Image: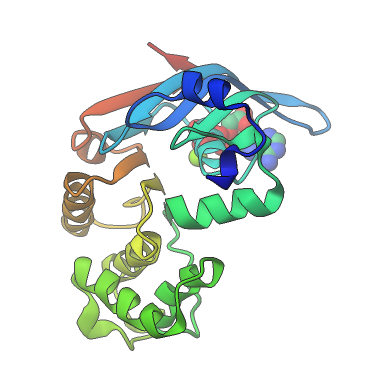
Amino acid sequence: MSFFKNKRDEDTIADIEIDSVVKMVDVSYVYKGPPPLQALYEVSLNIRKAEHVAIVGPSGSGKSTFLNLVGLLDRPSSGAIYIDNIDTKDLQEKERSALRARKIGFVFQAFHLLSYKSALENVMLAQLYIKTPRAKREKDAIEALEKVGLAKRAYALPGELSGGERQRVAMARAIVNRPSLILCDEPTGNLDSVTADMILDILDELSQSGLTLLVITHSSQVAARAKRSLSFSDGRLLG
Ligand SMILES: Nc1ncnc2c1ncn2[C@@H]1O[C@H](COP(=O)(O)OP(=O)(O)O)[C@@H](O)[C@H]1O
Ligand SMILES: [Mg+2]
């Protein structure tokens, strides 16, 4: 439990909420600029294991800023963020990266695959940051591709795959390290509605297997799949 090393035991125990995967307490975020721009105002929430949450709100309302904070890509200007009950404020940059690699998978609208690497190699890139034994890496990566129904295209380059297949590679990359949390920013934004449905079916399966999903979306098709919605407006979380 090295992540707790800077905290007194009694503080740690008091902070713990059973099954909490993401907890935020009064999180605000200001882009430094110039000029400075406050993108989030005192956001507090708790998201539990296996919840499937849609993040909705108009463009510019703070959704991506929120997801970047949950994903430990940015640090809040004030407030606290706990991932699996770990207070991320106490962590060094290296510990944050390790926590991110082990516990969080990302899926973006634009796939973000390396074009000169095969589907399998793209998935295996996520393993660089964790200590998977070399012999196990390829097996795990193939297994992740199987989960998204793409093992037979393991050696294809992204350019040889359809948009839906590319997003499935990105999803395999997001789940290969068996994270507890998957963060998606408009995962079906570049896909037609039939292909989007297939991606959403995979997300549903992941959620049923115990993964926690946070999905930013403009689409009512996508939001309808989630059991809970968080609605942002001008940097504030509405009720
Ligand atoms: N890198 C940045 N620097 C300055 N302001 C930014 C930056 N990224 C986003 N913003 C601003 O922060 C606010 C929230 O943006 P964002 O979180 O991207 O909203 P959303 O994802 O809901 O469209 C917007 O006003 C946006 O212009
Ligand atoms: Mg955004």
For the C terminus, give its image quadrant.
Answer: top left
The picture places residue 33, in percent across and down from the top left corner, at: 79, 34
Residue placed most toward the observer, 21 or 53: 21
The percent position of residue 233, horizontal first and vertical second, equals 48, 19
Front-lying residue, 210 or 131: 131
- For the view shown, which residue lies furthest in the bottom direction? 155
Q: Position of residue 226 (x, y in %)?
A: 22, 34
Do we see residue 6 in this rendering? yes
When asked about the image quadrant of residue 173, the answer is bottom left
Number of numbered discs on residues: 0
User: Residue at the spot x=18%, y=47% of the render?
Assistant: 204
At horizontal 23% and vertical 45% (from top left) the residue drawn is 210
* Horizontal side, residue 139 vs residue 183: left or right: left
The extreme right residue here reads 34
Q: Is residue 21 above or below residue 124?
A: above
Q: Position of residue 161 (x, y in %)?
A: 31, 78
Give above or below for 91 relative to 146. Answer: above
Ligand 1 is found in the corner quadrant, namely: top right
Q: Which residue: 65% across, 30% down?
A: 76
Residue reaching furthest top? 239
